[in-house]
Amino acid sequence: MAAVVFIGAGPGDPELLTIKGKRVIDDADVIIYAGSLVNPAVLNSAKPSAEIHNSAYMNLDEVIDVMKKAVAEGKKVARVHTGDPSIYGAIREQIDRLDELGIDSEVIPGVSSFLGVAAVLKKEYTLPSKSQTVIITRMAGRTPVPPKEDLFELAKHNSTMVIFLSISFIGELADTLKKAGYRNNTPVAVVYKATWPDQRIVTGTLDDIAKKVKESKIEKTALTVVGDFLGDEYELSKLYDKHFTTGYRKGKE
Ligand code: SAH
């Protein structure tokens, strides 16, 4: 195990932490967790002696300093991010700083919130004849989005869309998708704190979702998912089609 281990803590439910991630947390001497989103319950089994830092109150220099000092003292560091760290996790800048310092690190993946959302909705993003593509994106906030990835441009594909970090712009989001060619009655789901005890789900269409979200007072920690995968029409898969031969099974005449 590397001196610093980045861990995806999953979307909220502590049982959605990987076994490997839990083992590293249980063994860590120093834990730095993203307190604005990580469920603190994922740290319940940490050693009583573990030093715990909430990175919501720290800047990048402060995070790196804690890691550097701990590693110099021979301590094991767990850096705990929400969902999977590869999605809006801001891990690259930490890994690069650690590399410059000659500190070895590794990453343990987690269940991203967009996967938690699909699970709580009991839906499949890649429904045959509806969409075979998932676009994961966000609207520009304090972090800009490259012009070619503007929501309007991406939405022209009419694929399944998963939109992070944009709940406060839900009205603009729905309007943009309609302008880009989604039908006004395309189904939309907004999921607040998927897999947490206070999870909430708001469903609607591009026409009424903004109003419903405003009424529900959901203002943060929510994902918006859009597309006909939320509807009830689709074709059955080829994979389990009884007439279809696969590498593992012969189709019936
Ligand atoms: N790395 C994380 C995302 C971090 S960005 C992941 O893989 O999920 C933070 C954004 O993720 C939030 O603003 C929200 O849009 C989304 N998010 C994180 N946890 C969530 C949850 N449990 N339910 C719904 N959205 C969530």
Image: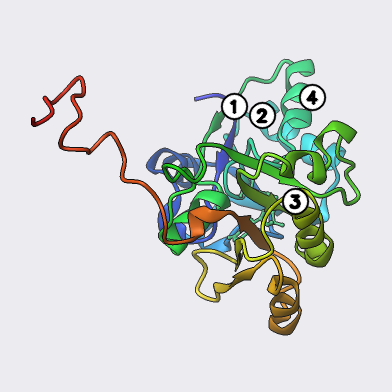
Where residue 188 sits, quadrant-wise, is bottom right
- The residues tagged by marks 2 and 3 sit, at their Cα atoms, a distance apart of 17 Å
Residue for point 71% across, 70% down: 207
Q: Residues within 10 Å of mark 2 (few under 14, many from 20)?
A: some
Q: Is residue 147 above or below residue 121?
A: above
Spatial separation of the CA atoms under disc 4 and disc 1: 14 Å
Please give the label number shown on residue 71. Answer: 2
Give me the C-alpha separation between circle 4 and circle 3.
16 Å
Check the image and report above or below for 14 versus 204: above
Instruction: Report which residue position mark 4 lands on.
Output: 97
Q: CA distance from mark 1 to mark 2?
A: 6 Å
The reply to whether callout 1 and callout 2 are in contact (CB within 8 Å) is yes
Given residues 171 and 181, the one toward you in this image is: 181
Image quadrant of ligand 1 equals bottom right
Q: Nearer the viewer, mark 4 or mark 1?
A: 4
Q: Which residue is mark 3?
A: 55
Give SS at disc 3. helix
Which residue type carries mark 2?
A: Val
In the rendered image, residue 89, in percent from the top left (x then y), is placed at 69, 41
Front residue of 235 and 134: 235
Q: Amino acid at mark 1?
A: Ala
Residue at mark 2 to residue at mark 4: CA–CA distance: 14 Å
Foreground label between 3 and 1: 3
Tag of residue 3? 1
* Amino acid type for the residue under numbered disc 3: Ser
